[in-house]
């Protein structure tokens, strides 16, 4: 079964967070924002996988998967479009 990804409101919220930051590397929780630490681990894993799949599908223009993991999480690069 295909992962359906983020709903429109969640995608827009994540895009606003990306647009508010300077270009450079980041971990997904940095753009997810407040509430990340309060999520169950399974929900964090699912959201992280959903974001990775969306990035790889080109759903977040300007975001690249670096293919690296540091500090317990995947590293992305924001080019700033």
Image (tube, grey):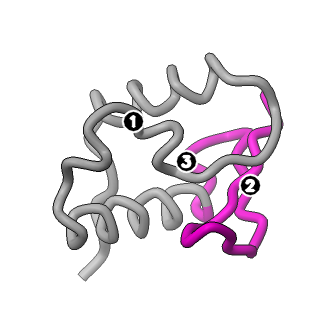
Residue 73 falls within the magenta-colored stretch: yes
Marks 3, 2: nearer the viewer: 2
Distance in Å between CA atoms under marks 2 and 1: 16 Å
Numbered label tally: 3
Is residue 81 at all visible to an observer of this figure?
no
Marks 1, 3: nearer the viewer: 1
Quadrant of the image occupied by residue 79: top right
Q: Which label belongs to residue 64? A: 2
x, y percent for residue 7:
26, 41
Distance in Å between CA atoms under marks 3 and 2: 11 Å
x, y percent for residue 61:
68, 40
Distance in Å between CA atoms under marks 1 and 3: 9 Å
> Magenta part of the protein: which range?
56-80
| Residue beneath disc 1 | 11
> Foreground: 56 or 32?
32
| Residue beneath disc 3 | 59
How dense is the environment of label 2, judged by Cα within 10 Å: few (below 14), some, or many (20 and up)?
A: some
Q: Residue 15, relative to residue 62: is it above or below?
A: above
Q: Residue 55, relative to residue 60: is it above or below?
A: below
User: Element at badge 1?
Assistant: helix
How dense is the environment of label 1, judged by Cα within 10 Å: few (below 14), some, or many (20 and up)?
A: some
How dense is the environment of label 3, judged by Cα within 10 Å: few (below 14), some, or many (20 and up)?
A: some
Q: Residue 4, relative to residue 1: is it above or below?
A: above
């Amino acid at each position: 079964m295909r992962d359906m990804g983020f709903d429109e409101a969640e995608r827009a919220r994540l895009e606003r967070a990306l647009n508010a930051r300077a270009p450079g590397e980041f971990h997904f929780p940095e753009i997810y924002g407040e509430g990340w630490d309060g999520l169950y681990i399974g929900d964090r894993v699912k959201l992280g996988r959903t974001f990775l799949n969306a990035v790889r599908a080109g759903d977040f223009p300007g975001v690249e998967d670096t293919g690296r993991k540091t500090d317990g999480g995947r590293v992305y690069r924001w080019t700033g479009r």
